[in-house]
Image (spheres, rainbow, N blue to C red):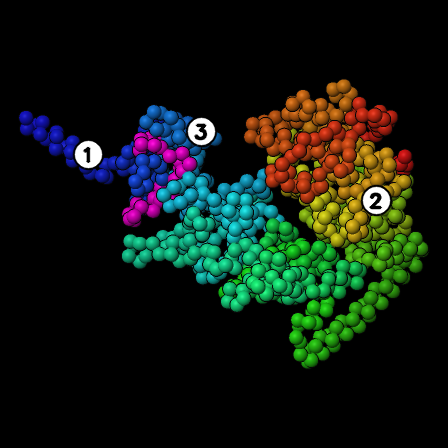
């Protein structure tokens, strides 16, 4: 009897001591249920099932262990509660976490993609719930930090993909007692230069801003960052943002609440309560676009909205009644002709404008950034990309400026483009300062004139000595073509001869319609590609001048960079940056090399080409039609980023011109649109057609005009037949078959976009800006119609039967019918 009493006491003792319900690790076959919890090594965090007040819905979450009331920082099954408080968390033999109810119905799973022979579940001291390999603790199979909830803990990162646009950020709860997915999301927007934003559904709610090297540009106080080591990392594939605490004794975290507010909490000195250190939006100026376009919001002024320097309210009546939604317009239009007299006004201490439609370059300085902006009529402002160490990099905005805020502490210099008259109106310089500037300008002009005379005489002597009358004529054409200032270096022929080892056959990279292309190395060690105009080429001085004129004034990360030219001794040479990975056709049409281009890389190339075409068609100073877009003209840099090249056949459209006409049809068989090949009509839709062919060639690994598959169809016809038969995946290249499982929707979307781009009628084809939205999954895709040159179209047989030339050679003498 005494022994029985001892057993009862022992049972009661073990049952009521709560520490025996806590675990530090979970192995396969074990579970967590009821009041059982998992704790971190030092007891900072605890994980287990819990309920909200007066609710039987049960959730598995993580919270701070010693702080009351319970502060939940992560929930696994936020959108699939377990009813009747009967949840069980299991760890499978493969390392997958599963939550089931009392009936064994699965409510949530971690869907772990990798497996381990001996998985183990552990809660780390930073609040990260991890599944790892017991035999290799550094190998993490799954972690909660990869799936943020509404709380950003130190060490956690929000991420956005640069490949497909997907993001993992903070998502608010529906309300304080319902953790299911709410309306607000705090994440990184990857359009243009990446920036941190809060959205309400698909609507931009608050824009925290882009990263300037020290902080996000919209940070209201840099003091908020002194306790943190914040990192904003941009790689080839993704952008991520997170922070670490500089003082390990500090307990602090960020949360997005059900109203979309971002709050920073820190533990009080007595470590019993949470103190709020920051709440955003801090004021109404933080609401996105509160003052409309081309304005700035200053919370310290009344009224808070005012137009940027050089702008006036679009509607004076609305503006005076404090209705600022229409924003502001320029007082004086910009000067976009060849005499470009525009300038810039520095807006000091600003939250930089919305960067979703911006362009950036890490390598050029602020002065080069200004010159680049002046060369592009759509450019409206610029700033340093990174403000550390005096500033570096270039960030450029186009068209309207949105969401600018004046900051009382911090902020950044933003240079707004205005007409010359606005510079006089706003500078307020005193006479002494103006006189000093005038004297300096005069001295500079005198020095430049003297220097110009010296350089001119030296060059003229060299030209006269070599008897180069043709060179003088051709150089004058380059210098004075349509009064356009083309500022590119002119190399001596001897320099290029030495660089290419006298145009050695061993240095030859390839052959195009222009002539051969050679690899070279300058004396400073820089690798170059030299395009040499062949004497037998149909592309003569006119095309040479056209390419120099166009590409010298184009700057975009998806356009090849022209380093200079050489015209001497009847030689006409173009010197480009060297692309180590050659061209797209070098990979996709080679049975061995094509395996190096997995789907993610091919999709990256397709998107890059699209971005380059959007710049040519819409964002550059002129509307430029390439007219010879093909895989051999898509060069690839060391990171396999695409760059459009060969602008010898390009044409420009001015003002509201939408299309042009010519009797001299140029281009390459297989890429020429039907309206251009038959009637000589060209437009941006001509390039869209070529882009569609490139998409289908990139997906299939086959050349359009050399493909003779089912029913002797070309590649476009074959793709159309596969689409109609609902078997488009049969089109894809063999090396991509392993990608079908994870990338099938993306591949199908690209096939459909390719078919939309090669439709017979130009009006049916999308614009390149629409194609970008389609590629990003942001625009609904219509059903495509029959592609051009499809066999059963009337008259198509005669129009296509003779087009069997190779893809590499450009046509320049085909006469339009």
Callouts 1 and 3 close, C-beta under 8 Å:
no
**Which residue corresponds to mark 2?**
660
Callouts 2 and 1 close, C-beta under 8 Å:
no
Q: Secondary structure at mark 2?
A: strand
Look at the image and give the residue range highlighted in magenta: 62-91
Q: Quadrant of residue 380?
A: bottom right
Mark 2 / mark 1, whichever is N-terminal: 1
Crowding at mark 2 (Cα within 10 Å: few <14, some 14-19, many 20+) = some
Q: Nearer the viewer, mark 2 or mark 1?
A: 2
Q: Nearer the viewer, residue 440 or 686?
A: 686
In percent of width and height, residue 433 lies at 68, 78
Residue drawn at x 37%, y 31% as measured from the top left: 99
Mark 1 / mark 3, whichever is N-terminal: 1
**Which residue corresponds to mark 3?**
115
Mark 2 / mark 3, whichever is N-terminal: 3
Residue 787 in magenta stretch = no
Q: Nearer the viewer, residue 228 or 135?
A: 228
Residue drawn at x 44%, y 45% as measured from the top left: 172
| Total marks placed | 3
Q: Residue furthest top?
A: 711
Q: Which mark is residue 669?
A: none
The answer, for residue 591, to whether it is visible in the render is: no
In percent of width and height, residue 619 lies at 71, 50
Residue drawn at x 88%, y 57% as measured from the top left: 476
**Which residue corresponds to mark 1?**
15
Q: Secondary structure at mark 3?
A: loop
């Amino acid at each position: 009897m005494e022994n029985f009493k001892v057993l009862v006491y022992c049972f009661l003792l073990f049952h009521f001591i709560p520490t025996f319900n806590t675990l530090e690790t979970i192995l396969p076959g074990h579970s967590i249920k009821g009041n059982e919890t998992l704790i971190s090594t030092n007891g900072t965090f605890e994980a287990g099932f819990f309920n909200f007040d007066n609710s039987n819905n049960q959730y598995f979450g993580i919270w701070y262990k010693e702080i009351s009331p319970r502060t939940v920082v992560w929930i696994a099954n936020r959108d699939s509660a377990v009813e009747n408080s009967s949840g069980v968390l299991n760890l499978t033999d493969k390392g997958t976490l599963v939550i089931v109810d009392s009936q064994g119905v699965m409510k949530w799973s971690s869907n772990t993609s990798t497996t381990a022979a001996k998985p183990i579940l552990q809660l780390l001291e930073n609040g990260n719930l991890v599944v790892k390999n017991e035999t290799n603790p550094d190998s993490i199979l799954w972690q909660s930090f990869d799936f943020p909830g509404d709380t950003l803990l130190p060490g956690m990162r929000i991420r956005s993909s640069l490949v497909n646009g997907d993001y993992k950020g903070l998502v608010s709860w529906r309300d304080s007692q319902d953790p299911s997915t709410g309306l607000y999301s705090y994440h990184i927007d990857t359009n243009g230069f990446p920036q941190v934003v809060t959205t309400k559904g698909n609507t931009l709610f608050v824009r925290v801003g882009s990263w300037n090297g020290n902080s996000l540009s919209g940070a209201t106080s840099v003091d908020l960052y002194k306790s943190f080591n914040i990192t904003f990392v941009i790689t080839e594939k993704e952008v991520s943002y997170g922070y670490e605490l500089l003082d390990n004794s500090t307990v602090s975290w960020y949360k997005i609440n059900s109203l979309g507010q971002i709050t920073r909490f820190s533990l009080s000195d007595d470590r019993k309560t949470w103190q709020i250190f920051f709440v955003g939006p801090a004021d109404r100026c933080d609401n996105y676009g509160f003052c409309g376009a081309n304005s700035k919001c200053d919370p310290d002024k009344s009224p808070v909205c005012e137009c940027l320097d050089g702008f006036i309210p679009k509607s004076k009546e609305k503006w005076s009644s404090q209705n600022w939604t229409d924003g502001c317009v320029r007082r004086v239009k910009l000067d976009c002709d060849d005499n470009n007299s525009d300038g810039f006004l520095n807006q000091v201490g600003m939250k930089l404008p919305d960067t979703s439609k911006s362009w950036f370059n890490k390598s050029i300085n602020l002065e080069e950034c200004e010159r680049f902006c002046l060369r592009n009529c759509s450019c409206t402002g610029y700033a340093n990309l990174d403000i550390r160490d005096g500033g570096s990099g270039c960030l450029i905005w186009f068209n309207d400026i949105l969401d600018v805020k004046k900051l009382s502490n911090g902020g950044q210099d933003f240079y707004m483009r205005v007409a010359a008259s606005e510079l006089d109106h706003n500078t307020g310089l005193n006479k002494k300062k103006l006189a000093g500037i005038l004297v300096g300008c005069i001295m500079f002009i005198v020095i430049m004139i003297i220097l110009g005379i010296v350089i001119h005489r030296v060059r003229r002597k060299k030209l006269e000595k070599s008897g180069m009358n043709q060179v003088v004529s051709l150089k004058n054409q380059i210098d004075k073509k349509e009064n356009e200032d083309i500022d590119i270096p002119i190399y001596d022929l001897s320099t290029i001869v030495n660089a290419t080892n006298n145009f050695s056959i061993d240095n030859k990279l390839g052959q195009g319609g222009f002539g051969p292309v050679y690899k070279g190395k300058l004396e400073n060690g820089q690798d170059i590609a030299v395009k040499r105009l062949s004497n037998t080429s149909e592309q003569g001085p006119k095309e040479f001048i056209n390419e120099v004129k166009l590409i010298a004034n184009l700057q975009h990360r998806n356009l090849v960079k022209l380093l200079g030219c050489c015209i001497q001794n009847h030689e006409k040479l173009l010197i480009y940056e060297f692309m180590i990975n050659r061209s797209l056709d070098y990979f996709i049409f080679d049975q061995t090399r094509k395996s190096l281009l997995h789907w993610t890389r091919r999709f990256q190339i397709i998107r890059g080409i699209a971005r380059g075409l959007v710049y040519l068609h819409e964002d550059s100073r002129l509307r430029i039609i390439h007219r010879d877009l093909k895989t051999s003209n898509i060069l690839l840099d060391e990171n396999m980023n695409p760059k459009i090249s060969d602008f010898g056949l390009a044409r420009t459209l001015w003002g509201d011109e939408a299309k042009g006409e010519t009797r001299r049809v140029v281009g390459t068989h297989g890429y020429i649109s039907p309206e251009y090949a038959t009637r000589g009509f060209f437009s941006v839709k001509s390039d869209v057609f070529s882009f569609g062919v490139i998409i289908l060639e990139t997906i299939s690994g086959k050349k359009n005009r050399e493909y003779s598959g089912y029913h002797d169809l070309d590649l476009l016809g074959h793709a159309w037949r596969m689409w109609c038969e609902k078997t488009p995946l049969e089109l894809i290249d063999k090396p991509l078959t392993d990608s079908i499982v994870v990338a099938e929707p993306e591949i199908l979307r690209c096939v459909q976009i390719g078919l939309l781009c090669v439709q017979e009628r130009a009006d049916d084809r999308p614009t390149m800006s629409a194609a970008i939205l389609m590629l990003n999954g942001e625009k609904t895709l219509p059903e495509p119609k029959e592609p051009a040159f499809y066999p059963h179209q009337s008259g198509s047989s005669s129009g296509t039967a003779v087009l069997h030339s190779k893809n590499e050679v450009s046509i320049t003498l085909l006469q339009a019918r």
